[in-house]
Amino acid sequence: MEKLVPAHLEFADDGTPWSASFGDVYHSAHGGPQQAQHVFLAGNDLPQRWQGQHRLVILETGFGLGLNFLATWRAWRDDPQRCQRLHFVSFEKHPFSATDLAIAQRAWPEFADLAAELQAHWPPLTPGVHRLHLDNHRVILTLIFGDATKQLRTIDASVDAFYLDGFSPAKNPELWTPELCKSLARLAAPGATLATWSVAGHVREALQAAEFDLEKRPGFAGKRQMLSGRFRSRRPNRHTPPVKRRAIVIGAGIAGSTSAYALAAAGWQVTVLEAADGPATGASSNLAGVLRPLPSADDNRLSRLTRAGYLATRALLGSLPDARWSACGVLHLGREPIHEAQQKRTIEALGLPDDVMQFVDRDTATEMLGWPVDTGGWWFPNGGWVQPPSVCRAALAAFPERIAIQYAAAVHCLKRAKTETSDTADTWQALAADGTVLAEAPVVVMASGAAAPGFEQFAWLPQKAARGQVTHLPATATPPLPHVVCKLGYAMPEVDGLRLIGATLQAGDTDRSLREIDHRENLARLNLSLPGFAPELDVATLGGRVGFRPMSPDRLPMVGPVPDVVAATPNTRQHALPRQPGLWCVQGFGARGIVWSALMADLLVSRIEGEPLPLEIDLVDACDPGRFLLKAARRPAEESDDTT
């Protein structure tokens, strides 16, 4: 992983924001907002092109201080004929901190309300894709922190308008190369446009070679000319949005609830079918679970996915005021000194901001916990605990006009059927055991956890249920605990008078009853992590919770369109696998439902809608359920839970 180097706010003599690294200004000294309007909006024939559309996707090559984004957002908000959803994808190799953004954006009082919302959602400065849902989910900002010349190859989007706004070709030539222009062409939707203030000859040649027809237009302020262009290729659009936005979600655990929330936020009508009498009765029923990423020195797929998921869950929790959680911090202690040293090297290798993760030594960890420990370890200051049932309830209640919930509605099977207006089977029916149609819609999302392989369409799914038992201690039975502690297991601060410790993990075990032997195992792990923390307790008096976690063979989620197993062959490439139309799944979260739920719901909806994806392509492929149908040699290697 290439470490991220943040930008530092500097100003030229005339007060224009300036980059000493590139020796160039961030925008025209003659009026940044006016330049954004003249060059980038008007140069792409906006706002006219988004009027009456469902969505418009803009891609920008340099986010800088966010001026073009704010100007576009303001023009979109002020237009009564605006599209329903505005996607803005932007790259930034050297992002600013939220503090520097706030200082610089004071220069544009006309954007003050939008700037405040942007700053409130600004992510930590970590490499990769960050998704910001703004303006009541109608404006989606996808920020990619990293080198655009490399990162452009990692994203999947269908772009309607390009803002080419890096530093000048003379100062930053890498952002204007033929290779970069070809990367833009790969993402261009039919009829895509572009605009830039640069009319340099080699830039024009590179864009023309990438199938953009160009014209010179009058430039802004002191510049005589600018460029506008249109993509001339007539290749078909692979990202057309669906016409009918109705879906069935099977399961009201954390996977199903967040998926229903994300669909409703995108304007879908959703019917949630849950076999139990309420939400979160299965693996999502724990009183609390841990929220933190799982770093690795090589920043492998599990590390990147859990970091992205952790940040996405934090953002979702901020938008659900009725969700119960605590950002009390998570201290992940080394198992022994060798592991502790590996943890320290991981921190040094990743170079992530202190507000994401730090290394603390044994003495500091002892002081933080108020209890002696044998090792130091990772400190996640904004991690904590989350109550999954409260997240499920809050997510399902967020859009009452778009989410209909049927409890005690056990789905026996799924069937394709014809509608009255069609001669082909173009809708899905969810049937009860007696044949009653519980719901029907063009799209079905399977999110029933351990129950999914019981359906014919999912019998092939290589998912196993693993039994886990959490032990509930009376909070008064141990000393206070200010933070979540992980080592051989986990222990939490007080939640509703209880201290949760755990958890066991037994694959293939179907026993639903609480077991004293598992309580003893959880207590033993606690006392190894925090020596002498829990006195002798009568395990027969302890409460707890047993759940069955749906695990995939490689410990990664299974999210995406469901393959047609009969039509697929082992030699088919993953992107070409035949799929069952309208059938999707959000499965295989294992013990990471809290970390992955928000991110995977976003990925699901983005793939259904054909919108820009919230993850790099390799991570999307790593989560695709079709990966298990490919030849064994091409299957992804199992992701290790060893966080060294």
Image (cartoon, rainbow, N blue to C red):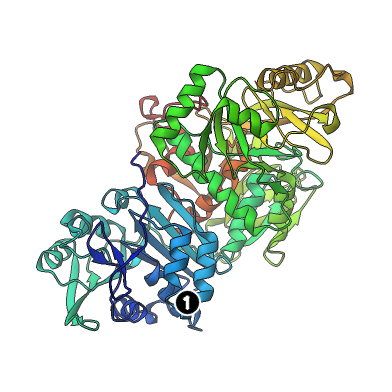
Query: Horizontal placement of 517 versus 315: left or right?
Result: right
Residue 81 image point, x, y percent: 48, 82
Name the residue at 51% across, 63% down. Answer: 119
Quarter of the figure with residue 55? bottom left
Kind of element beneath mark 1 = helix
Q: Amino acid at mark 1?
A: Phe
Q: In this view of the protein, which residue sits in the foreground, 256 or 19?
A: 19
Residue 12 image point, x, y percent: 28, 70
Counting the numbered discs, the total is 1
- Residue under pointer 1: 111
Q: Answer yes or no: is residue 344 visible.
A: yes
Query: Horizontal placement of 364 versus 271: left or right?
Result: left
Quarter of the figure with residue 201? bottom left
Q: Quadrant of the N terminus?
A: top left
Residue 110 image point, x, y percent: 47, 81
Query: Horizontal placement of 60 versus 375: left or right?
Result: left
Name the residue at 61% across, 19% down. Answer: 374
Q: In this view of the protein, which residue sits in the foreground, 548 or 494?
A: 494
Q: In this view of the protein, which residue sits in the foreground, 449 or 89?
A: 89
Q: Answer yes or no: is residue 507 visible.
A: no
Residue 561 image point, x, y percent: 49, 46
Name the residue at 74% across, 44% down. Answer: 280
The answer to whether 248 is drawn above or below residue 412 in the figure is below
